[in-house]
């Protein structure tokens, strides 16, 4: 699981700015999940993507949040016009096959909104 | 959709004692139950998982049991050590969506006192 990369590890934004979080899957993994962890809370599903497709975005707020996983390059979670409530740790997890294959987590991006 | 409840929220044991964490789930279609360990400021790491075709799985000091009829599964750690101190999360896939997204329990903070 050390192969799942996320950057930046820490991100500080002022209210109203944009945040871009990147996730590079383990080699051979083409399934990406994004989870959010609020302080002192558990992990909440946000969005599930395969290459060039959003499969399930039921956990992602309809406004200000978007995600993509292009044919080339990392998956990106984008938060526009950040608010203080967006402060959290954002983890991606990747897997080789869809379904109940093991999900391996990246180190996370800790977003702080001032 | 799936709902996962985890108890207790905190657990303190003496080094060498056993620790048990319990989870219940709601979706009878769920067939995969991973356990993740998260140290402070780190990524969740898979420590053990069980699939619904078995009732118990063991890996050294860690074991997981599954009762499909009652829809609950438990993590057992024997001969606890201070390095077992962490937050532990159980999870189950959201069977209704069939996407593999995980629904996590609220977490258990385990403290092992030397």
Image: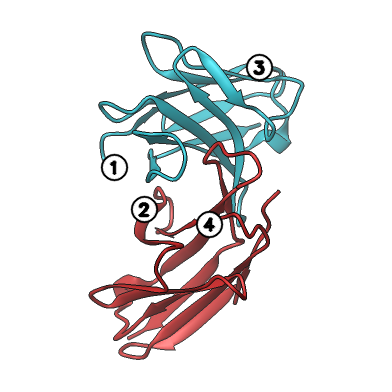
Chain colours: A cyan, B red
Q: In the image, residue A25 lies at what x, y percent?
A: 35, 28
Q: CA distance from mark 3 to mark 1?
A: 31 Å
Q: Quadrant of the C terminus of chain B?
A: bottom left
Q: In the image, residue A38 lies at what x, y percent?
A: 62, 47
Q: Few, some or many C-alpha atoms within 10 Å of disc 4 (few <14, some 14-19, many ≥20)?
A: many
Label 1 close to label 2 by CB (< 8 Å): yes
Q: Nearer the viewer, residue B95 or A91?
A: B95
Going 44% across and 77% down the picture, which residue do you hit? B111
Residue A17 has which mark?
3
Q: Nearer the viewer, residue B75 or A37?
A: B75
Going 51% across and 62% down the picture, which residue do you hit? B90
Which mark's residue is nearer the viewer, 1 or 4?
4
According to the picture, the residue beneath numbered tag 2 turns out to be B45
Residue A1 has which mark?
1
Q: CA distance from mark 4 to mark 3?
A: 33 Å
Residue B84 has which mark?
none
């Amino acid at each position: 699981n050390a192969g799942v990369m996320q950057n930046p590890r820490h991100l500080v934004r002022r209210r109203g700015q944009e945040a871009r979080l990147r996730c590079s899957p383990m080699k051979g993994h083409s399934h990406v999940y994004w989870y959010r962890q609020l302080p002192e809370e558990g992990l909440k599903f946000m969005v599930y993507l395969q290459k060039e497709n959003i499969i399930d975005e039921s956990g992602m707020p309809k406004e200000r949040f978007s995600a993509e996983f292009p044919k080339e390059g990392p998956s990106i979670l984008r938060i526009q016009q950040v608010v203080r409530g967006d402060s959290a740790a954002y983890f991606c997890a990747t897997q080789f096959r869809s379904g109940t294959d093991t999900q391996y987590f990246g180190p996370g991006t800790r977003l702080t909104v001032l | 959709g799936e709902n996962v409840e985890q108890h207790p929220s905190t657990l303190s044991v003496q080094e060498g004692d056993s620790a048990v964490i319990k989870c219940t789930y709601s979706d009878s279609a769920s067939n995969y139950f991973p356990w993740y360990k998260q140290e402070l400021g780190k990524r969740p790491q898979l420590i053990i998982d069980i699939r619904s075709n078995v009732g118990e799985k063991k890996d050294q000091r860690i074991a997981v049991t599954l009762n499909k009829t009652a829809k609950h599964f438990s993590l057992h750690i024997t001969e606890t050590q201070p390095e077992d101190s962490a937050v532990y999360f159980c999870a189950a896939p959201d069977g209704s969506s069939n996407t593999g997204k995980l629904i996590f329990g609220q977490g258990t903070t385990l403290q092992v006192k030397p």
